[in-house]
Image: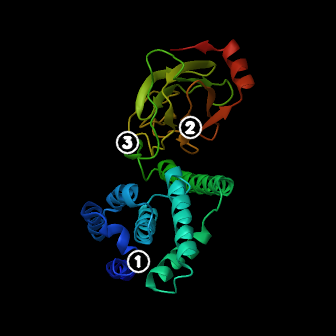
Amino acid sequence: MTCLIKMKVALAALCMLISVSAFSQSAIVQLQFEDAEKAFNAGDYEAVLHHLDEVEKQVGVTSKTLYLRVVAENQLFAQGGNLYEDEAQFTRLQQLREHAGQYLKAMSAQGLDDKFREVYRINENLGQYPATKTAWLDGKRAYLKKREDERQQQLAEEKRQAQQRKDAEYQQLYVGTLSLEQARYHQVSQIAKIPSDSTATVFLIRPEEGTENVVQSVIVNGAMVLDKMKTGSYAIYHCTPGLIKLGDVFAENRKKVKAGKALLMGGVIGLAATSGKIIAKSEKPFLLDLKAGKTYFITSIVTKDKTIRYELTTEEAGKAYVSTYKQVN
């Protein structure tokens, strides 16, 4: 603001010091120059240049018009966009540098005054910017590379934070302090009616090893999808991408069942002894994030110690099971 006030004061003094004779030839020229001054004081620097062009068409370039042009162009350059994002800024820079140099050269023998000092300071300040188009292009490449590096760093940080939130939520889902319905950072998978390129294929397999006299009910994300599944069988499900959960732990079986049968309560296979009071418990909840177009083979084994164990097995092992087992859905 102080600099601008000084320029306005210098402008008022300029009219009395140089090139008065050129303007006295025409009242129209004087009025046009006054319009340029008014536009400068109003901060309309584009209008300043327009009025100066009209003046110089009639009287040529004078010290008055050149000074006013330099200070107006300096304001436009200062208010412009990023030098390396807008080539028009480089054009303004070159014009400003040229006109400031012309003024200093023409007025160097006229003695030191405030106007000369102001243009000198402007010209010195331009030294920090590229002097040629080649230097500007080099600077632009360096600027764009730095900006891209910063963008990639920001994206990497955002990705890290997103994964951190997702991992924390996964842990809550795993220990049961958060339900799938409350998940914010995981998509929850749904069983699809028909397979497609956008679904995942899940083979749920009951191997023959383990407790054979247990009948398993299959529950996916809290919903029963199959009520009876014996060993030596498998079921196929086509699911949308997202998280599935198997094996929620249930403390005890409160329903009396026949000997040798099992009941899945709340997502867990129940194993009934003769009394019907003991059930098998999941070793741990089973969570799997399904991806579109992928195939997964999951085995479910009820062990001798009444523990339910879900495992993601290899494609080779899964296909070996499927080749000899019976599909039950």
Q: Which mark is residue 18?
A: 1
State which mark lies toward you, 1 or 3.
1
* Other-residue count near label 3 (Cα within 10 Å), few / some / many at <14 / 14–19 / ≥20: few
Residue under pointer 3: 181
**Residue 281, visible in the rendered structure:** yes
Q: Label 2, on which residue?
A: 288
Q: Nearer the viewer, residue 169 or 139?
A: 139
Q: Amino acid at mark 1?
A: Ile
Sort mark 2 into few (<14), some (14-19) or many (20+) by Cα contacts within 10 Å. some
Q: Earlier in the sequence, mark 2 or mark 3?
A: 3
Describe the element under mark 2 as helix, strand or loop. Answer: strand
In the rendered structure, which amino acid carries the disc numbered 2?
A: Leu
Tags 1 and 2 touching, CB below 8 Å: no
Instruction: Mark 1 or mark 2: name the one nearer the start of the chain.
Output: 1
**Secondary structure state at the residue bearing disc 3:** helix
Q: How much space separates mark 1 and mark 2, taking CA atoms? A: 84 Å
Give the Cα separation between the discs numbered 2 and 3.
16 Å
Relative side of 130 to 163, left or right: right
Seen in the picture, residue 29 relative to 238 is either above or below; the reply is below
Q: Position of residue 282 (x, y in %)?
A: 55, 41
Residue 194 in the image: state x and y as whole percent: 47, 14
The quarter in which the N terminus is drawn is bottom left
What color scheme is it? rainbow
Residue name at image x 70 percent, y 19 percent: 319
Closest to the observer, 249 or 55: 55
Q: Residue at x 31, y 79 (%)?
A: 12
* Residue 269 visible somewhere in the drawing: no
Residue type at tag 3 = Glu
Residue 316 position, x and y percent, is 75, 23
Nearer-N-terminus badge (1/3): 1
